[in-house]
Image (cartoon, rainbow, N blue to C red):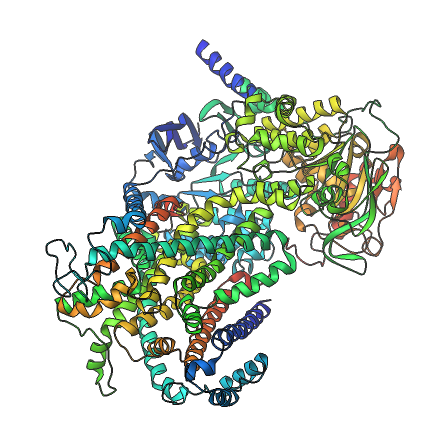
Amino acid sequence: MSEKLFEVKDLRISARNDEGVEIPIVKGVSFDVNKGEVVALIGESGSGKTTISLASLAYTKPGLEFSGGEALLNGEDVLSMAPLRQREIRGANVAYLAQSAAATFNPAITIGEQVTESAVLHGVLTQEEATKRAEALYHALELPDPHRIGYRYPHQVSGGQLQRLMAAMALCGKPDLMVLDEPTTALDVTTQIEVLKAFKKVIKEENAAAIYVTHDLAVVAQIADYIVVLYSGEVMEQGSVDQIINHPTHAYTKRLMAAVRPTPVAGMGEAVGSEHDRQFPAIEVKNMTAGYGGIVDGEPVSTILRNVTVKVDNGHVVGVIGESGCGKSTLARVMAGLLPQAKGNIKLEGQELEGSLHDRKLEELQKVQFVYQMADTALNPKQLIGNILGRPLEFYHGIKGKEKHKKVAEILEMVELPAEFANRYPMELSGGQKQRINMARSLAANPEVMLCDEVTSALDSIVGANVIQLLTNLRNKTGVSFVFISHDLSTVGSFADEIVVLYAGRVVEQGPTDEVLAPPYHPYTRLLISSVPELRIGWLEDTMNKREMAVGIARGVEITKVGCPFFNRCPMAIEGTCEVTDAPNRELKNGHIIACHLTEDQLNEAERETQKILKGFEKVGVDKPHAPASV
Amino acid sequence: MMTQMVLHRLGIGVATLIVVSIIVFIGTSILPGDVAQIILGQSATPETLAALRAQLGMDQPGYVRYFLWLGNMASGDLGISKAGGATISSLIGGRLGNTMMMAGIVSAISIPLSIVLGLWAAMRPGTWLDRIITFGTLSTISVPEFFIATVLVLILAVELHWLPSTAYLTGNENFVELMRALAMPLITLVIVVSAQMIRMTRAGILNVMSSPYIEMAILKGVPRRRIILRHAFFNAIGPIVNVIALNLAYLVSGVVIVETIFAYPGLAKLMIDGVQTRDLPLVQACAMIFCATYVLLILVADVASILSNPRLRQPK
Amino acid sequence: MTENITKEEEVIAKLDSFAELPDAPPKRKLKLSWVGKAAVGVVVLWMLIVIIGPSIAPYHEMDMEGEDSFLDAYDNFYLGTDYLGRDTLSRILFGARNTIGISILATVLAYCIGITLGIAAAVKGGWTDMIISRINDSILALPSIMLGLIAIAALGSSIPILISIASIIYATSVFRIARALGQDIMVQDFVEAARARGEGLWWIIKSEVLPNAAMPLATDFGLRLVFVVLFISSLSFLGLGVQPPASDWGSMVRENLQGLTYGSYAAIWPAFAIATFTISINLIVDDISAKSGGSLAKKMV
């Protein structure tokens, strides 16, 4: 029996509204953390998971207060301690790691001072010892240049590095317990897996106990020993990782598992019927180059997309995938006319479209609708839902008065919301409901093409899954074509008929979903697929053994003028070729295209002999003389 | 990048000064209409008017006069006062010194005072101390400078007889006499100028205090004093320096009022007299001195806030 | 056990019926503290006096009814007499019309100019914005009292001139705020969505920009009004504002300044009147504006 380090007993936390009435937020939660054990608190937003985890630091967010129960650290209740004693515990015994390192590092203080501050202030270590320990931690966390990174300011290192530096900050004072609050959520998949690996390694080496707060079951499966499932401030179910992941009993846990989208594999794409087919594709772009800033020598000063060709057939869903900074949103903005292209052309149902919004006809604007990622900013907070949805009806179709009311109610029904929502303001709706309104506004225009920019990224998994279901129904019912942009390959794979993989502004691979998700892969697609965490215990170790992953974090996305932009991260790159000449588009079967210097046979062979890739990777090496990642 | 930004600010400063000079020139030379008429009054004969116009260069087009005026200003020739015909430089000379002395002493007292009180209030928001400081400064910035001055005169001079109610200088005072004479205007100005600076320092710190990195510092167990002084203050320096410079503007309007109330022989008093007698060349010169000083202060603040930002000091 | 099952069903039922909690609580009602309520009372009182002041005043502002100058309160002279033996209280009641009335007129005018140009600059952008902003910044770069002095030196002083000068000077800061607000709103996704829909500029200004800028601008109106009151009073105090014999709080202080040495409060009362008005407005604005940062700061140990 292992030793109990931290015990939460019947913890209650509440908020107070304007009238001074107490509103319970956490309603009697109990669980234990043993020494050397990682306990995951899992739940969706509003579950109280972060609030509960902060109790270990005797801290609540402003506006909340402890209203009952105990939180025992080494047998001593931290909630009832004197404030000064609580301060001593924070940082020395319990350390906190926040979701966004970029926001939690003080921009005006060097990294080194911030990492060692807590340990020195609490007298755990002298400044000299702390600096030494910090360097050892930088090394263990595989941060570049461990001797000098401490002298830098936070804005001088990359996001993935900052996240790991925050782990160093937490560990420097040798705490008994670490609280990790969604530490990898804000990162790209390829970076997340590296950070996850580093955390796991360090937690093991330091033999630290941890509370890991997340909404992501697949991540939990990799790092936790014990799982507590929360909903609305109450424990639904708790047990060992194996018990919860492999044999969940509570209906809510099962719901959560069901909302986890399957790992992208060939065969998940849906066959599309031909009932919506027309003579021309709904929308297509050809050899399009676009970017920001003025145009010099026929190219934008800051080129994002280069020579992109994408075709969206009627009633089809084309998924666009890639890491942040690859130009996914830019592609949709060009289609919508928000960013005129510098080169190439766009066609709507076979008709040439002007690049700029102002030059497009009203009918063309109506047929192409853009759906924003954040419903919060996309809906005017001062307008009633009825007006938000009614405006496109009136503006495009001249529907007014009673008929408009009727139409608004119909549209609300299409997105599965009650008609009385028309009299509400956006602020009075939940995140998922707002996102439905956001899509309903585009639907009200009766469009041919909907451009959905990361519409599920900000939503909880169950809510997001519902939204995807809704989109699928809409597509089948109305025959609208979708361009579905996401950084999440599983989401794209489960919804799109075709996939376009963007890397640094270029299409590196495209084709039907089943073809793209099956070998031969473009090396970048391969990296993406292998980075998506599986809901399987031990997946992380399996993947990390294929050391190819290291390229994910070694460098960020860099936009290049010539050659293949993936060159400096590619384990199979051919030096002297890839970085100087653009990759040829290789057409494979079923309209599957891969832009790579390697031939189909070479790619297939590489797939059969993973070892060979790894050898190639050793040769290329992580420390190839290239500028260090700074993105 | 930083050098570029500093140069950019310098450029803006120079441009602002030029625009300022144009505004002052238009305000004092074009808008009033016939300056010769104003100087000589209604009874002047057409001949004397024409002669004065020629003497003032008023028969030339506006832009020529502007450049002539600007050239004269730059070379230190501020023109001739209407009253008594003395050169304006001689009128300004000693008075500029008096005003500068007052402004200097006020800044030297109120800047450190404001930062200390502002930090102190920010350190314990919501406590009685904070409320007193907040309410006191809010009241001070809400009332006219002359209200504070009158109340001070009533209390310190009329009721308590501690200090003289005027600050007239003969030029022969020893240090103690000088300080006694200056005390009332100084106290008034320090109160007026500090109130806004205290509020802004407090607000600047509290604004930073809602950042996630402050929450992180609390969760690291960093003590209150260190959070304020190391974590918050360093991020608020830029805004605070800006506020200090902007509030030296209050010093300008404060100086105008205070010199009038206490009959202090400073530049502002001279300018008010000039406005009352419509001595336009004098107003012109005084306005240029005040405005140029102000623009210069803003420039210094801008540059200082650029220098205090590590993102600009230490590029990627 | 049954209890457990019902609980489970409850949770699932909640999930299915979209009974998710809104991210933000419904609109917070505007709640004033007792200080704020008292301040509203003072402001309302002064507004009333602006309207009915002259009819409730015991004497006319010009009447030299008192037995002598600088008398303390006696008989019907509740606040004593001024340097000409006029009733101080009556002059304050009359003066409210000048001091507050002129200030409100000037502020409203400043708002009309500032908002129109500010929103136009924000929406139009490009050269229009560039030129208006540059000119505006230069005017803003000067202490307002200096501009006032220059303008009065050039044009002399009368009430229409005072109102014009104050409104132009303060329109610059309204412009700054309106432009910044407009720019913030113009880059919001919902405005881009309207542009992508093909909406015209006027519709965007009317339906998207103005409703979102209204509240912050309203709060700012109070602050601006205080500045204008102080500006006009200061000019009057310097003898460059409202001209005698009309009563105005600023000039009343100036006229009676010499009485201070005889212990007369005739200069204090009008100054006090200004103070109650301006402090009250600032207290209201302070009460309405969100208190930023304080909540986290209270967590420090």
On the image, the x and y values in percent for residue C59 come to 20, 55
Judge whether residue A442 can be spotted in this image. yes
Camera-side residue: A542 or A299?
A299
Q: From the viewer's perspective, is C276 left or right of B6?
A: left
Choose top left, top right, bottom left or bottom right for residue A522: top right
- In this view, A563 is above or below B92: above
**Residue at the far top in the pictured view:** C2
Q: Residue at x 57, y 67 (%)?
A: B5
On the image, the x and y values in percent for residue A242 come to 57, 24
Camera-side residue: C116 or C65?
C65
- Total number of numbered labels? 0
- In this view, A406 is above or below A79: above
On the image, the x and y values in percent for residue A509 come to 80, 40
Q: From the viewer's perspective, is B162 left or right of A267?
A: left
Choose top left, top right, bottom left or bottom right for residue B252: bottom left
- In this view, A447 is above or below A504: above
On the image, the x and y values in percent for residue B49 come to 48, 86
Q: Residue at x 47, y 48 (%)?
A: C217
Camera-side residue: B303 or A347?
A347
Judge whether residue A571 can be spotted in this image. no
Q: From the viewer's perspective, is A393 left or right of A359?
A: left
Quadrant showing the N terminus of chain C: top left
